[in-house]
Image (tube, rainbow, N blue to C red):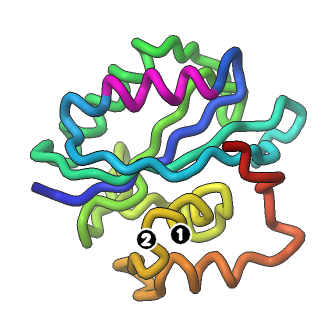
Amino acid sequence: MAVVYLALGSNVGDSAEHIKQAIKILSKSVKHIKQAPLYASKAVGYTDQADFINTVIGGKTELEPFELLALIKEVEQEVGRTATFRWGPREIDIDIILYGDMHMETEELTIPHASFRERDFVLKPLCDLNSELVDPISQLSVAALLAHIEADQESVIQRID
């Protein structure tokens, strides 16, 4: 079984409930789930939208990376995600952040997630789960990566649970 970390975010409707529902569905294939606290954060990319609720979960899965990606897309649809535009509002967004110590880059999937090192709304909850977790690319812990986030790049507003 592979140890995986997934980031979940929502800013449309009952965001906390969307995240809860997504985790429940994911738990059928991702076992031993541990969830970080929820955080409110400012939108990144397209900023003229509501704040997001974000968290990270860790768990174990027998799914291969592309099987996990397919499951994630199904979960997003089941929770009610509707197509908008890049960085637009979302009922639910789920990203594979880490899959063991795997490193892969394809058109459909990049592991570790290409932008997670610059996103405090991913790094803070990752630190809550395991601050010594190491990025297989930079070889830095998630705590060290979080410490490198510049103040003007911070998006987390507050922990909300």
For the image, the number of numbered tags is 2
* Residue toward you, 150 or 132: 132
**Residue 101 drawn above or below residue 109:** below
Rendered location of residue 160, percent (x, y): 73, 44
Asked if residue 137 is positioned above or below residue 16 in the image, the reply reads below
Q: Residues within 10 Å of mark 1 (few under 14, many from 20)?
A: many
Choose between 137 and 79: the one closer to the eye.
79
- Disc sitting over residue 130 in the figure: 2
Secondary structure beneath dot 2 equals: helix
Q: Residue at x 68, y 83 (%)?
A: 147
- For the stretch drawn in magenta, what is the main secondary structure? helix
- Do the CB atoms of the residues marked 1 and 2 lie less than 8 Å apart? yes
**What is the quadrant of residue 125 in the picture?**
bottom right
Residue 67, image x and y in percent? 19, 37
Is residue 115 among what the camera can see? no
Query: Of all residues shown, which one is farthest toward the front?
Result: 161
Q: Position of residue 110 (x, y in %)?
A: 38, 56
Marker disc for residue 55? none
Q: Residue beneath label 1, please? A: 127
Q: Tell me the kind of residue under disc 1.
A: Cys
Q: Decide whether residue 23 is among the magenta residues.
A: yes
- Taking 119 as reference, is 45 left or right? right
Q: Magenta residues?
A: 16-25
